[in-house]
Image (cartoon, rainbow, N blue to C red):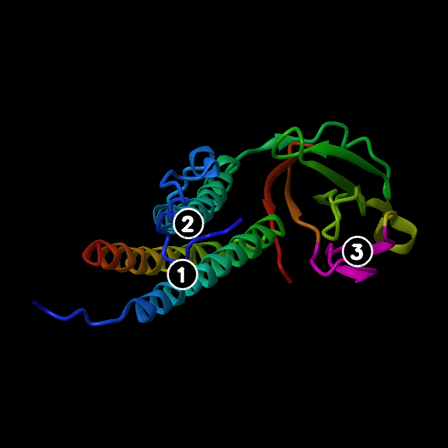
Amino acid sequence: MSEAPFTRGQRTIIVYGIMSVIVVMVIVQLWLLTATMNAFLGGDVGIILPAALASLVCLLFNLGLLRYLHGNSRTNK
Amino acid sequence: MHRDPDGAAPAPGADGEEPQWRHDFPIDWTQDEYVARRDFTKFLGLTSLAFVLGQFWILAQSMMGRGRNAGKVTEIRGARDLPVGGSLTFSYPDEYDDCILVRTGRESFVAYSQKCTHLSCPVRPDPENNALLCPCHHGSFDLATGRPTGGPPRRPLPLVELEVRGGKVYATAVKERLQ
């Protein structure tokens, strides 16, 4: 029988750590969206594409972490 | 409310039956926490996706807005009858985009968006002082260039490009400026 790499307490810390990172990324995305809308309404369109790409990178990072999280919880069932 | 730390069902009473509250609130705490965490992560993922969609919606609006009014030419009626120093308002490129035209000389005109770049109040011409004034917060712009000269505005007024053909004045484009 293979031994689990982490104890239950360690897994809980990892899960909450990952969720904290995801929450921070979502807040960064919210800031990006408000800053982009502000710039767009002010006539500054040069920032829109880089901000959209940055937000997309945040989403992909979040999805990767969520996939890891869900995969981890599935193997620990 | 008492909660078993392991999420297990509480020990039955002395007579072997479960307490009444257990029947009234049959919550499986372990399952409840598991579902709550999964739902929360799903919610975070969907929120993240919604923000990205919002960003790309802004991008689409920006690109559509740029193409929608490109090359639109509109005659400004009444411009030729204006006295030097006189002004009139017109709509360009859409009916909701108010602009102001000022005749600065016999053959020279300037036109800008009428929305103050501070908080969008309509600006009014003050030809005696060679300025456009915003009455809301006492912002002022140079009449010849549209650049801010006082008050809260930091960006120049969008410039409406004009063309005089056959005695008529036409608006041909709006030029947004950041500096």
Which mark's residue is nearer the viewer, 1 or 3? 1
Whether B82 is drawn above or below B47: the answer is above
Mark 1 crowdedness (10 Å alpha carbons): few <14, some 14-19, many ≥20: many
Q: Which disc, if any, is residue B141?
A: 3
Q: Is residue B165 left or right of residue A72?
A: right
For the C terminus of chain B, the quadrant is bottom right
The residue at which mark 2 appears reads as: B40
The CA span between labels 3 and 2 is 51 Å
Stretch of the chain drawn in magenta: B137-156
Q: Position of residue A73 (x, y in %)?
A: 26, 56
Q: Tell me what residue is drawn at x 46 percent, y 58 percent.
A: A51
Q: Is residue B74 left or right of residue A32?
A: right
Q: Residue furthest left?
A: A1
Q: Chain of mark 1?
A: A
Q: Quadrant of residue B123?
A: top right
Q: Is residue B118 left or right of residue B174?
A: right
> Regarding mark 2 in the picture, which secondary structure is present there?
helix
Whether discs 2 and 1 lie on one chain: the answer is: no
Q: Nearer the viewer, residue B164 or B125?
A: B125
CB under 8 Å between discs 2 and 1:
yes
The CA span between labels 2 and 1 is 9 Å
Q: Nearer the viewer, residue B6 or A6?
A: B6
